[in-house]
Image (cartoon, grey):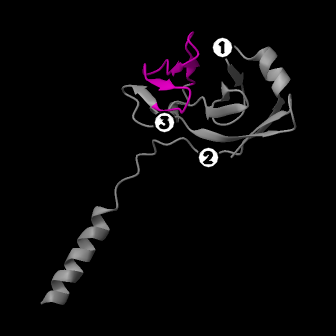
């Protein structure tokens, strides 16, 4: 009897863990981008540099502090199948999804305003060279 109860419980757990995938995720695509820190300094607006046609909807490279950068895909995590590109707000601190009105913090990609509940997709950033070396974004 205990074996049957245990088996039934295990089966229940198995099926409870199988939810329907709603497809609301940002797909993985290969990202490799390089630029010099000097070029970033010249071309970035409010510490944010936008690169089109890379990633899912383009990428944003953000300078957090001296020699500290983060990078995110511009594809909003709200209804990502729409490939709606977030736009950097004038403050350079947040980005807004023009399709849903959701906001994201640019220091870590976290959602700041509903309907966003997931962070922006982040990419790895590394620095090479000394001084005005190279900024490398990849996954």
Camera sees residue 63? no
Q: Position of residue 62 (x, y in %)?
A: 66, 26
Which badge, 1 or 3, is on the more N-terminal residue? 1
**Rendered image: mark on residue 28:** 2
Q: Position of residue 48 (x, y in %)?
A: 67, 20
* Relative depth, front residue between 36 and 25: 36
Q: Marks 2 and 3, how far apart in space?
A: 15 Å
Please rate how many residues cluster around mark 2, counting C-alpha atoms within 10 Å: few if below 14, some from 14 to 19, many from 20.
few
**Nearest-to-viewer mark from 1 and 3:** 1
Q: Which residues are magenta?
A: 85-110
Marker disc for residue 46: 1
Q: Is residue 132 left or right of residue 124?
A: right
Report the side of 30 relative to 20 (left or right): right
Residue located at (33% from left, 62% from top): 17
For the residues bearing labels 2 and 1, Cβ distance under 8 angstroms? no
Circle 3 sits on which residue?
119
SS under mark 3? loop
Q: Position of residue 26 (x, y in %)?
A: 54, 41
Determine the image quadrant of residue 4: bottom left
**Nearer-N-terminus badge (2/3):** 2
Q: Tag 2's secondary structure?
A: loop
């Amino acid at each position: 009897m205990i074996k049957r109860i245990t088996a039934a419980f295990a089966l229940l757990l198995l099926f409870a863990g199988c939810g329907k995938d709603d497809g609301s995720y940002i797909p993985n695509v290969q990202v490799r981008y390089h630029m010099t820190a000097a070029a970033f300094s010249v071309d970035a607006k409010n510490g944010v540099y936008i690169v089109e046609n890379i990633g899912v909807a383009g990428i944003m490279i953000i300078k957090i502090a001296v020699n500290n950068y983060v990078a995110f895909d511009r594809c909003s995590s709200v209804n990502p199948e729409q490939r709606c590109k977030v736009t950097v707000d004038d403050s350079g601190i947040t980005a807004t999804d023009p399709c849903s009105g959701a906001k994201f913090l640019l220091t870590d990609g976290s959602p700041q305003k509903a309907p966003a509940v997931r962070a922006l997709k982040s990419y790895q950033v590394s620095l090479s060279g000394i001084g005005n070396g190279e900024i490398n974004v990849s996954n």
